[in-house]
Image: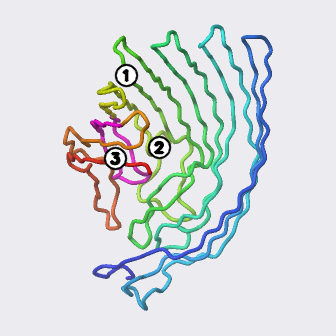
Amino acid sequence: YLYAVPSAVVASRYVQKTYSEGAYLHGDYALTDAFKVVAGARYSRDRRSYEGGSIDVDGAFGPKAQYLAFLDDSKAESHVSGTAGVEYTPLEHWLFYGTLSTSYKAGIFYTAPALAQASLAYVAPEQVRAGEIGFKASPSKAFEIDGALYEYRYRDRQSLVLVSVADTIIATLGSVPRSKVSGGELQLKWLPPIHGLEIGAGMSHIDSEVTASPANVRGLPLVAPIDRGDVLPQSPRWSFNEIVRYEWALRDNLRAFAQLKYSRATRQLAALADPNAEYGPTSDLGLRFWLEPADGKWRTSFWIENAEDNRTINYAFSNTDGSRVIYRPQPRNAGVEFTYRF
């Protein structure tokens, strides 16, 4: 029974080489003063080679530094992607747009330590068809607003997945046959009638799901089934961000800045097929105050991170024995920095 050992250190020893080349064309044409069409195309070619694998550092499984999993392989892929869209500018500082596009993410060999050759094997390229409509507007010099709605349909989306090898859980990169992500985002920027004050805020909504699930990952069994309708990793349903910044002059050649920055996100997953991967909600509040001369020659600053002293879980996953590993944010901390440019 290979894994009946007190402890073991497994590391990766490999060489992965990547060669990429591409060519693209992009252009736009004004139909009228207000309407413009845009189009583009790109050809990509990628070649990857991998030699190496995972070694037993301490000799827990036998002779030291022996390969527990080894792979020597290379793959080449090519792809043509494109985009087409329209832009409409009915008024100065107002833009409405819509685009349809395809995109491609090159395949890769997963390089984290693994106990099976199949875990190191080539992960197929990821392809996506995307549609987006949105706007960018500046109704006044003091106010900006951007918004968008989108939908991405993926084929072979590269996602972190947990599989089982000889009753041991390992993480690898797998391909989800079909999935989609849809949502919207809104971003605001406001300059109130107070000199030096700037306020920004944003929000995002994501609705993601697996639409065709894999039965295994390159022949390796999943730790837990991936069902149609499952949420994709790193896809919080809601996320928000806010920033308030104030600048004022202490003297003719010295400026002071104060900034408050806050972000939060609802629950999300670290990986698929992992019953311990759900974590959140998460939030972070940071404060910063700094001084600098007008020429920016030096800067001194005071900062506070995690000002709320938030102790929530901001990452989680299954260990090799099935136990849950969690990460918490660093407790409230503060510091002083000084920077000088020579």
Q: Is residue 61 above or below residue 302?
A: below
Q: Is residue 317 above or below residue 139?
A: below
Which amino acid, mark 3?
Glu
Residue found 69% across the figure and 38% down from its top: 102
Q: Is residue 39 left or right of residue 50?
A: right
* Pointer 3 or 2: first along the chain: 2
In this view of the protein, which residue sits in the foreground, 160 or 28?
28
Crowd rating for badge 3 (residues with CA inside 10 Å; few <14, some 14–19, many 20+):
many
* Pointer 3 or 1: first along the chain: 1
Q: Is residue 321 above or below residue 84?
A: below
User: Does the magenta portion include 288?
Assistant: yes
Q: Which mark is residue 232?
A: 2
Disc 3 from disc 2: Cα separation? 11 Å
Residue found 25% across the figure and 47% down from its top: 336
Q: Which residue is mark 3?
A: 278
- How far from the left and from the top, in percent, is residue 19? 70, 62
Q: Is residue 94 left or right of residue 204?
A: right
Res. 284 image quadrant: top left
- How far from the left and from the top, in percent, is residue 171? 44, 62
